[in-house]
Image (cartoon, helix red, strand yellow):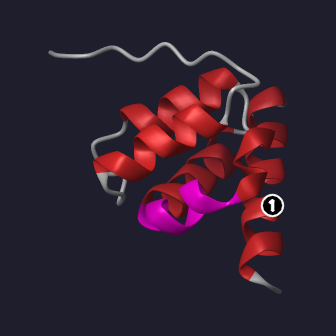
Amino acid sequence: PSRSSSSTLVFDVMVTAKDNQLDGMYSKCLSKILSEGSQMLRSDQIIRLTAPIMADVLQSDDLCAAESEVFEAVRCSDNTTVALKVGP
């Protein structure tokens, strides 16, 4: 599958896992997104993620992405508001 369809699948499975409290599947999707952070954040399909899921992704110390990519992803995902805790 293409990178776009791969990210779409991960995003869709993650939303379904969160909705159905499938914690193991949710964790696997989160790990995939975090490890491929730059690629995932550049996907136009990132808008599929809900605000609480975006918060989990963006607040993780394990997100492999440059700060500028994170800000761009949040800026482009204007369909939801993500409240991020800044600082300790």
Residue 3's x, y, as percent?
Answer: 71, 79
- Secondary structure at badge 1 equals helix
As drawn, is 72 to the left or to the right of 21? left
Residue 14's x, y, as percent?
Answer: 73, 46
The foreground one among 45 and 26 is 45
In the orientation shown, which residue stands out farthest toward the left? 88
Q: Quadrant of residue 54?
A: top right
Point 42% across, 52% down: residue? 69
Q: Quadrant of the N terminus?
A: bottom right
Point 49% across, 13% down: residue? 83
The foreground one among 57 and 13 is 57
As drawn, is 33 to the left or to the right of 62? right
Q: Tell me, yes or no, whether the highlighted magenta stretch contains residue 27.
A: no
Q: Main secondary structure of the magenta part?
A: helix
Point 70% across, 48% down: residue? 46
Does residue 74 sit above or below 34 in this rendering? above
Does residue 77 sit above or below 87 in this rendering? below
Amino acid under disc 1: Thr
As drawn, is 1 to the left or to the right of 59? right
The foreground one among 54 and 67 is 67
What residue range appears in magenta?
Answer: 35-43
Does residue 68 sit above or below 7 in this rendering? above
Q: Tell me, yes or no, whether the highlighted magenta stretch contains residue 39.
A: yes
The residue labelled by disc 1 is: 8
Q: Quadrant of residue 22?
A: top right
